[in-house]
Amino acid sequence: MKTLSLILIPVLFLGFSGCVLKIPEIGLPEVPAGELVRALEQRRQSFSGLKAVASVQVMRKGRKRSYDTVGVVLASQSKLRIEAYGPLGQSLLALVWDGKEPVLRLSGRDTDMRPGQFGLERILGVGMEMRDLCAVLSGNIPDTAGTAGAKAFCGPARPAGGPDGACVVELRQGEMVRRAWLRRPQSESAGEIKLRMYEVYRSESLLFRATFEQVETISGYPLPMRVILENPDKNATLTVAYDDVDVNVPIDDELFTLPAAEAAAP
């Protein structure tokens, strides 16, 4: 069923508990982390919300599925709404998260579903929480990543006029390892950092990798117009391509609730 498969995209592409890929060596010299950690935080704080229409493409073991009209609404990294529409503009499904509990509504069902903590893990997969999903869709890393004990690694300085240098910020929390791959400008006047990729590992296994492409500055915020989530070990890729986008605009809290006409299933 197409409507159900869209909302279960995270099951197919973010449920990576069976991955065996080990954490690779970074291969760059270590540098003080403070400047890059602050830059990531400033980038995150400069984003307050997003309203967009996107297309979604799914590739799994050579098989492709495409969804032309998907609405995405983000309020920072605290609230999310994803809604898929049919060819006549009808709502096929809606996934709403108000920062507390996600609610899923499917067309044709009499009741909504509340997955709960353990059900949510089955839907989104190991290592992918709602805040991670919000962060990735806005081209950020989550504010829950933590900065204590952060490490940074950067390549050698580039000559004047050359490309910006590659850097990695690594954040560890117990068995979780998060890496933000970015490019740092040669000077403060050259603009802010450019986040290129975000990886999350747990117990040495890759949970997911997000790649950010086609960055456009909208309302002063550099937004990746293509966000790619992948699991190389499973040969699976999810691509979200934004089309019509508004960034840092007022977001109505009512968007993150569903009408109470239908009782929610436990």
Image (spheres, helix red, strand yellow):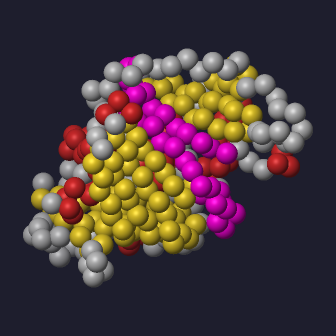
What x and y, as percent, mark residue 221?
Answer: 65, 60
Tell me: 35 left or right of 40: right
Q: In the displayed image of the protein, which residue is found farthest to the left? A: 110
Residue placed at 63% from the left, 18% from the top?
Answer: 27
Residue placed at 51% from the left, 43% from the top?
Answer: 211
Residue placed at 67% from the left, 24% from the top?
Answer: 153
What x and y, as percent, mark residue 77?
Answer: 48, 52
Q: Which quadrant of the figure contains the N terminus?
A: bottom left
Magenta segment, principal secondary structure?
A: strand
Q: As rendered, which of 80 and 227 lies closer to the eye?
A: 227
Region in magenta: 194-223
Q: Is residue 91 above or below residue 28?
A: below
Q: In the displayed image of the protein, which residue is found farthest to the bottom? A: 88
Q: Tell me where residue 73 sits by quadrant.
A: bottom left
Residue 78 seen from this side = no
Tell me: 52 left or right of 260: right
What x and y, as percent, mark residue 41?
Answer: 64, 44
Q: As rendered, which of 242 and 66 lies closer to the eye?
A: 66
Tell me: 246 left or right of 33: left
Q: Is residue 113 above or below residue 23?
A: below
Q: As rendered, which of 214 and 109 lies closer to the eye?
A: 214
Q: Which quadrant of the figure contains the C terminus?
A: bottom left
Residue 196 magenta: yes
Q: Tell me where residue 13 sits by quadrant.
A: top left
Residue placed at 27% from the left, 26% from the top?
Answer: 18
Residue 70 seen from this side = yes
Q: Is residue 55 above or below residue 205?
A: below
Residue 91 magenta: no
